[in-house]
Amino acid sequence: QVQLVESGGGLVQPGGSLRLSCAASGSIFSINAMGWYRQAPGKQSTLVARITTGGDTNYADSVKGRFTISRDNVKNTVYLQMNSLKPEDTAVYYCNAKIQVRRGWLSSDYWGQGTQVTVSS
């Protein structure tokens, strides 16, 4: 069984910073891409940032230059450093990982439980 546990959300003022963490645990053979998605009230979930095993990254245009995704392959953890936060960044943030649980098996998508980020004065 695989679990993704997120932490680090909360309430922050505009211009502030938060750092989200997501740790994968359980029966894991390998982890491929990891990423963060967000869903604002009444809107569809969208990709925020993604990082490959080798460290290649891509970001939504709305967060480029403000957010940084990174990962620790030893700890099976992905991070999202969010700076210069804006009210429009308010959403539930979900961690995603493509995990192979056994050698030779296809990777499957796993999701965290979500963490609320609220940017408001």
Image: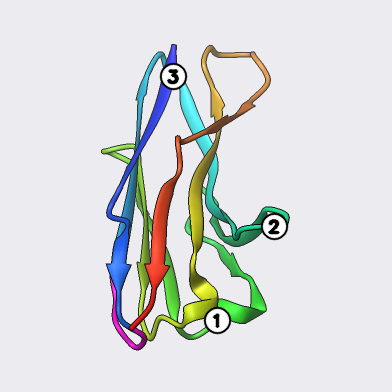
Residue to which mark 2 is pinned: 42
Secondary structure at badge 1 equals loop
Alpha carbon separation for disc pair 2 and 3: 29 Å
**What residue appears at the point 55 percent right and 81 percent down from the top-left corner?**
64
Using the image, tell me which numbered label, if any, was put on residue 2. 3
Quarter of the image containing the C terminus?
bottom left
Work out whether 67 lies above or below 96.
below
Using the image, tell me which numbered label, if any, was put on residue 21. none
Point out residue 59 in the picture as x, y percentages from the top left corner. Answer: 60, 70
Using the image, tell me which numbered label, if any, was put on residue 64. 1
Left/right of residue 14 with respect to residue 48 in the rendered view? left
- Looking at the rendered structure, the number of numbered marks drawn on it comes to 3
Secondary structure at badge 3 equals strand
Quarter of the image containing the N terminus?
top left
Secondary structure at badge 2 equals loop
The amino acid on which the numbered mark 2 sits, given as a three-letter code, is Gly
Which residues are drawn in magenta? 14-18
Which SS type dominates the magenta stretch?
Answer: loop
**What residue appears at the point 64 percent right and 72 percent down from the top-left corner?**
60
Point out residue 75 in the picture as x, y percentages from the top left corner. Answer: 26, 38
Point out residue 18 in the picture as x, y percentages from the top left corner. Answer: 29, 68
Alpha carbon separation for disc pair 1 and 3: 30 Å
Alpha carbon separation for disc pair 2 and 1: 23 Å
Pick the front one: 106 or 20: 20
**Mark 1 vs 3, N-terminal side:** 3
Work out whether 96 lies above or below 3.
below
The amino acid on which the numbered mark 3 sits, given as a three-letter code, is Val
Label 2–label 1 contact, CB within 8 A = no
Closer to viewer: mark 2 or mark 3: 2
